[in-house]
Amino acid sequence: MPELRIDPLSGLRVIVAGERSERPGAWPAVAARPPLDPATDPFAEGREDQTPPELYALRPGGGPADGPGWRVRVVPNLYPALASVGAGDGVDGPVGAASGGEASTGPVPVADPLASGSGAVDLFAARPAEGAHEVIVNAPDSVDSLLDLGRDGLELAMGVWRERMRVHGDTPYRHLIVNEGKAAGASLPHTHAQLYALPFVPAAVARERERFAAYHQRTQGRNLLEDLLVEEVRRRDRVVAVGSEAVAICPFASTGPFQVQVIPRRPAARFEDEGPLAADVLWDVLDRLARVLGALPPFNLWVRTAPSGAESFCWRIDLLPRLAQPAGLEMGTGVWLNAVAPERAAESLRAAGDSGADRQDASSAPAGPGGA
């Protein structure tokens, strides 16, 4: 029987209809990706002249900027979605207080002229898209996956993610993403992250902020995601892996097959603050996905962190494999249809076991199909 589930973090609805995974053509083939050619890879070490001048680089041995010797490198996006222009233009002031008395500070876009009720209506309101849009090259070698970085390499890259989010800590929201694979929107195969320093708090994030704050107030100071994680671990149906720093689960209202969330064991509002990075658990999840599906699928990853001014929050990492395409239901209503129950997905990922613990070499290929 299909179920209509409500996401406890966002309040949005998802339809879980597991039997649809049996229909013909429900699953795209997941194939191993061809190796990258360093000679045509603009992100490879030694080709620094193919990118804009670097903003930051991790260089253990020192050396000049825009040259070899780096481990992780940050450059402006060559085709930015946000423009760095005069600060303060078109600013309305601070974001209004969220539930529970919290407020987000910093510049925000012009308010919705149809919702403000303040005189004349402008049906085509617009403002410059100010902010920052950076590319974080996760490794100097021509590899196309976070998995190929190994546990240590992934932790190194994630440390730079945190550092760059911290640099833009005065903006209303920092959104870090990894698009891996062409089907997930990656225009270049070399593993990289992107950071958007946004001049506003996106509606999806604001919705979660308000639910965290309301839960904090209603429960006299408890944290929504912390309590959710405790209950998930107690039930164990959707737990994928447990590490010393974090726990991976397939969320109750997963929007797609094999969606995974990596949640710190101790709640912390912001990913960019000091504390565990959860790289070990994230790498483990990627390895399990590769084993279960026969190869690592294209996926989208994003870091959900607290917007400016929010404290009753907890960061997490969301990973959504691109195993199904959104269609008319999702695009027309915002209601996702998931053909794989998260309980079944978590069971398959748990069955993959920890046999990939020694897969550290960036040249290793994903193991064969697991217990899907």
Image (cartoon, grey):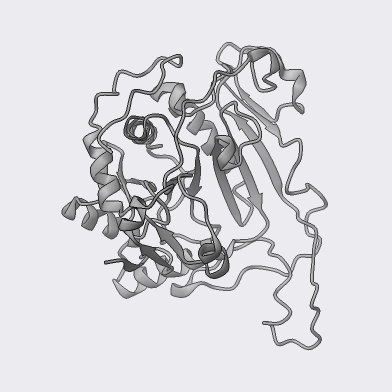
Q: Residue furthest left?
A: 234
Q: Quadrant of the N terminus?
A: bottom left
Quadrant position of residue 255: bottom left
Q: Nearer the viewer, residue 240 or 30?
A: 30
Q: Is residue 271 above or below residue 293?
A: below
Direction from residue 268 to residue 105 in the image, left or right:
right
Q: Position of residue 156 (x, y in %)?
A: 48, 26
Q: Position of residue 335 (x, y in %)?
A: 47, 66
Q: Nearer the viewer, residue 265 or 282?
A: 282
Q: Nearer the viewer, residue 345 or 191?
A: 345
Q: Is residue 106 above or below residue 297?
A: below
Identity of the residue drawn at 72% across and 50% down:
131
Identity of the residue drawn at 29% across and 71% down:
219
Q: Position of residue 332 (x, y in %)?
A: 57, 68
Residue 112 visible from this viewpoint: yes
Quadrant position of residue 278: top left
Quadrant position of residue 356: top left
Q: Quadrant of the C terminus?
A: top left
Residue 242 visible from this viewpoint: no
User: How many numbered discs sit on the rendered protein?
Assistant: 0
Q: Is residue 285 above or below residue 72?
A: below
Direction from residue 76 to residue 299 in the image, left or right:
left
Q: Position of residue 327 (x, y in %)?
A: 54, 59
Identity of the residue drawn at 49% across and 51% down:
305
